[in-house]
Amino acid sequence: GESVGLHLPTLSVQEGDNSIINCAYSNSASDYFIWYKQESGKGPQFIIDIRSNMDKRQGQRVTVLLNKTVKHLSLQIAATQPGDSAVYFCAERELSYIPTFGRGTSLIVHP
Amino acid sequence: SAVISQKPSRDICQRGTSLTIQCQVDSQVTMMFWYRQQPGQSLTLIATANQGSEATYESGFVIDKFPISRPNLTFSTLTVSNMSPEDSSIYLCSVEVLAGDPNTQYFGPGTRLTVL
């Protein structure tokens, strides 16, 4: 069936650098995409979302880019901080359906 | 947003026993879900908890193993029955909050289950 996956299971960065976490999706009918952050011992926390009629959306220190041509989604974190260390999940959904979650990328920020 | 609490936060159980996990939301929500997250893995939907009717289970999950209750719009329970070590996982309650189109999904802190 359709699936959502991540390219890199682990990403290590230095504090202050920018981080880019990538996600590939295969369901061409998906029209809504979400990024979640999961810190150790906690549940996933909503970060940012984007509709399929957009190719970029910015939040506080985070930017999500959507390339529907190649079915690719990315999360950019500016000036990465130790508190950004977590597992990041992308999720995709058709609006009337429940989201499908990707595999997750572990972001490690070194001070 | 929604504030979701789960009880217990963690437990260690013996093989063959059952554990009931509670999920409480601070506001009335239409949609409640239960997920499983095995160590180092992503989230897998177990079922949608329907208020006033039987839960809707995903492929690979059955009511006898994971009975779910949803007595009202703020509370749900998931029971993991006749546990085996393979059931060791984090179990997450999730709700969908009406926030326009699309709605936003929030998660509880999870229940970490270890089966010996």
Image (cartoon, coloured by chain):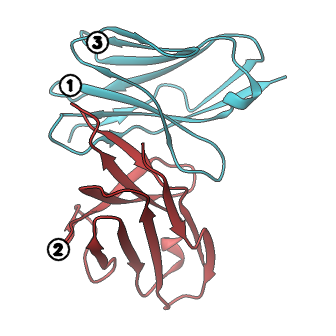
Judged left or right of residue B33, residue A98 is: left
Whole-angstrom CA distance, mark 3 to mark 2, is 43 Å
Whole-angstrom CA distance, mark 2 to mark 1, is 30 Å
Q: Secondary structure at mark 1?
A: loop
Q: Amino acid at mark 2?
A: Gly
Q: Quadrant of the C terminus of chain A?
A: top right
Which residue is label 1 attached to?
Answer: A31
| Tag in front: 1 or 3 | 1
Which residue lies at the image location 39% right of the left edge and 32% below the top edge? A5
Which residue lies at the image location 76% right of the left edge and 27% below the top edge? A82
Which residue lies at the image location 33% right of the left edge and 76% below the top edge? B66
Q: Residue furthest front?
A: B27
Residue A6: x, y in percent?
45, 29
| Tag in front: 3 or 2 | 2
Q: Is residue B38 visible?
A: yes
Which chain: cyan? A
Which chain: red? B
Q: Is residue B48 above or below residue A79?
A: below
Residue A46: x, y in percent?
46, 36
| Residue A9, image quadrant | top right
- Would you call the spot at circle 3 few (<14 residues within 10 Å), some (14-19), or many (20 or more)? few
Q: Chain of mark 3?
A: A
Q: Secondary structure at mark 2?
A: loop
State yes or no: discs 3 and 2 in contact (Cβ < 8 Å): no
Which residue is label 3 attached to?
Answer: A70
Which residue is label 2 attached to?
Answer: B52
Q: Quadrant of the N terminus of chain A?
A: top left
